[in-house]
Image: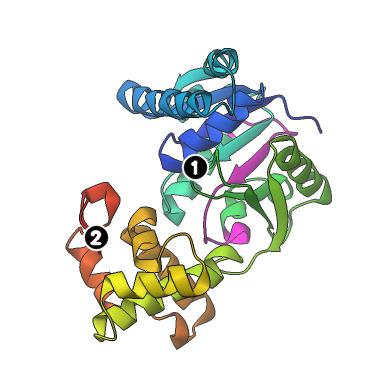
């Protein structure tokens, strides 16, 4: 199946990045948001990020203008057209919200449409119950999407080979590196990353070292570009907690128990960069 028209549902951090790369690769890109204000915010972010690429000579000014022309505004999921080849859901990480969205999409999609979710940890098989499971797949981009090469492509229990092959080939067309992953909590990226972040928070809570020194150990000792606590702030502590809870509930294993300090900080709305304070102040 050839993908020509793509709808990205949700224009937040991940959604605007996904729309950015599709539009830049000359796909007809429909960016769907719940209001004019949210759409404008997403579109302005894409424009600024394209400007950065122009300034770094990654793309030309003409490519930027063409990319912006390829982005079409859609307010409200119900207003998406049924001739779209691929719907990419990039809303917030909540299972019920995603399932409710898919029920609406069920009334819009045609028999050949593929629905992909950008979920970072929720079971693809469990999400697929609301749609045709053969045409449903996980397409987990990394943040920031325009820069990061990896895409985890996650098969649900019933995802067809045709759907998988279409999405894998599409990722390559986007100049991404696709990695096939099967449907287990946290997939690969977050199953490995989040327990490391969680352990760093435990180390901080227990007074093993300061936040700066914990991050320095991982940057200088393990050659990580960013320490785990600064990375948690970048991701969002609420997102980290949500993923740890998915791992904990999915495997029923105490090694995935979310750190009490992480839970306390989320309760206090100290979520990292997006609220101006997490482990560090911004």
Evaluate whether residue 32 shows in this view.
yes
Alpha-carbon distance for marks 2 and 1? 24 Å
Which of disc 1 and disc 2 is earlier in sequence? 1
Q: Secondary structure at mark 2?
A: loop
Name the residue: 52% across, 17% down: 68
The N terminus, quarter of image: top right
Q: Main secondary structure of the magenta part?
A: loop
Q: How is colour applied across the structure in the image? A: rainbow
- Is residue 254 placed above or below 193 in the rendered structure? below
Label 1: which residue?
A: 90
The image shows residue 207 at horizontal and vertical percentages of 24, 85
Label 2: which residue?
A: 278
Evaluate whether residue 108 shows in this view.
no
Which mark's residue is nearer the viewer, 2 or 1?
A: 2
Relative to 58, is 275 on the left or the right?
Answer: left
The image shows residue 114 at horizontal and vertical percentages of 69, 39
Q: Which residues are magenta?
A: 107-126
The image shows residue 94 at horizontal and vertical percentages of 42, 54
Q: Which picture quadrant has residue 45?
A: top left
**Crowd tier of the residue under label 1, counting other residues whose Cα lies within 10 Å: few below 14, some 14–19, many 20 or above:** many
């Amino acid at each position: 199946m050839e993908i020509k028209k793509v709808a990205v549902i949700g224009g937040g951090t991940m959604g605007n990045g996904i729309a950015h790369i599709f539009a830049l690769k000359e796909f007809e890109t429909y960016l769907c948001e719940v209001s004019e204000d949210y759409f404008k915010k997403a579109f302005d972010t894409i424009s600024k990020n394209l400007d950065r690429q122009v300034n770094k000579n990654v793309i030309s000014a003409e490519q930027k203008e063409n990319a912006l022309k390829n982005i079409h505004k859609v307010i409200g999921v119900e207003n998406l057209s049924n001739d779209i080849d691929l719907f990419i859901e990039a809303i917030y990480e909540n299972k019920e919200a995603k399932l409710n969205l898919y029920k609406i999409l069920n009334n819009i999609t045609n028999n050949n449409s593929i629905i992909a979710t950008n979920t970072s940890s929720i079971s693809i098989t469990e999400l697929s119950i609301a749609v045709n499971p053969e045409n449903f797949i996980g397409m987990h981009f990394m943040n920031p999407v325009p820069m990061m090469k990896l895409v985890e492509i996650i098969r649900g229990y019933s995802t067809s080979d045709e759907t998988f092959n279409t999405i894998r080939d599409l990722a390559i067309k986007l100049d991404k590196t696709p990695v096939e992953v099967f449907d287990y909590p946290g997939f690969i990226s977050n199953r490995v990353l989040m327990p490391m972040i969680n352990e760093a928070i435990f180390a901080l809570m227990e007074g093993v070292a300061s936040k700066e020194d914990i991050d320095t150990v991982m940057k200088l000792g393990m050659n990580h570009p960013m320490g785990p606590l600064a990375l948690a702030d970048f991701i969002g502590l609420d997102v980290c907690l949500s993923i740890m809870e998915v791992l904990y509930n999915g495997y029923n294993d105490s090694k995935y128990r979310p750190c009490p300090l992480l839970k306390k900080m989320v309760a206090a709305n100290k979520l990292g960069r997006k609220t101006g304070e997490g482990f560090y102040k911004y």
